[in-house]
Image (cartoon, rainbow, N blue to C red):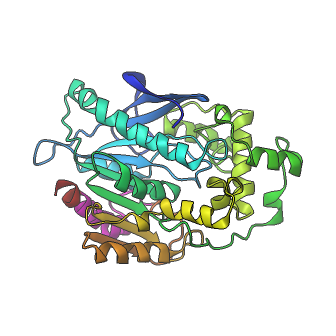
Amino acid sequence: MTGCIMSSVQVVDVARSTKSGLPEPFLDCVYKDTPSGPLYLRIWPSSTVTPSGVSPWAFNIHGGGFLHGDHLRPMIWHSRGFLERGIHVVSISYRFVPHVSFRELLGDCLDAYAWCQAHLPDIMRRRGRSIDMDRCISVGGSAGGTLATIIGHLARPRVRCVVNCCGIVDLTKPLPPVRVDPTFLALNEDITTEEELQLEIRSQNSARATSWCPNLTQDLLPEHLEDEQESSCTPWVVTRATRIQYELFNQIFGRNLMIPVVFRRDNFASDKAYQDELRSFSAINMVDESYPPTIILHGLEDDIVQVEQSRSFARVLKKKRIPVREVYVPDAGHSVGLSWKDENQLEWKTYVRPMLDDIVLFSSA
């Protein structure tokens, strides 16, 4: 792992969410210093008192193909839904490939978990809140779901529950080919030639890594900028490095190179060694009788990560007698759950409430 876990609590900001739909004040903290700068996590303490008087907590990992995204605004049902059940929420940042390896990226997640174990009890105590550090829910969507399932195996102490939303659990299985408009792959002013692009893709300089990269084609259109900044409660400064990182995501994803780039296929002397690496980081191969109870959410129309990934994972969990709830949503794609923001929505009543019930049950076991 590269970087140094912070041994003290450095609170960067305390704010109250507004347009984000998150009703609680939050804290921004630095959990790790790295060659490319500090890594942050955002903490939402829940004000809801649980029946036991002691609250579990959710360790939220954002998605983005391991190449972009941000930790500032978890999906509403991952955040407000948890907070209203008395579950504190921690959302973490991590460095993106290709400038760091998958091992380093995963190391960031594990370091964030270790920081939480060391510092969350005191943070909550100072704010008059209780927390049971042994009752953690590892939750993530897409790439974050992949990481959440691995955290379910590696984190110590073990988490009590895993929530995987559309994450890859078997990295050896080919993903569906992405078909994009050719204009999507047109190089921009920051990466102007194919040679420059290949140099960026092959970069392994951790000092150049970024850990914040929103969807620049959607989030930062002028008419959306003000609302998006307010919803994240964070001023956004888009640098050339941010634009390059997002262009790398476009090119790598659009060329169907995500897994080979994330796991640095070119560094392996043989395909067998590369496949062994993929198998070693596939959560489906990590399941034993002690694996945590798991919630699986997947859209049946997902054309990025096949729903069979989730079905296969569920079969393995059941074979090991691990409690599992499978939720497959008709007519939903890879962004399933993103629009679930209101407890009066049919989807909230149909899908979110039962999942939250099981999350509370599993995390209390």
Tell me the residue at 30%/31% (across/down).
118
Left or right, 68 with reference to 158: right
- Relative to 1, is 145 above or below? below
Left or right, 303 with reference to 165: right
Query: Does the image show residue 11?
Result: yes
Q: Main secondary structure of the magenta part?
A: helix
Count every numbered label the image shows and give the total.
0
* Residue 314 vs residue 333, the one in the foreground: 314
Give how far across and how far down residue 222 sits, in percent. Answer: 69, 41
Left or right, 331 with reference to 241: left
| Quadrant in which residue 318 is drawn | bottom left
| Boundaries of the magenta span | 340-359
Furthest-left residue in view? 52
| Quadrant in which residue 272 is drawn | bottom right
Give how far across and how far down residue 298 sits, in percent. Answer: 45, 70
Give how far across and how far down residue 78 sits, in percent. Answer: 38, 53
Furthest-front residue in view? 269
Give how far across and how far down residue 231 sits, in percent. Answer: 50, 40
Tell me the residue at 35%/64% (across/down).
348
Tell me the residue at 83%/44% (across/down).
191
- Relative to 26, is 168 above or below? below
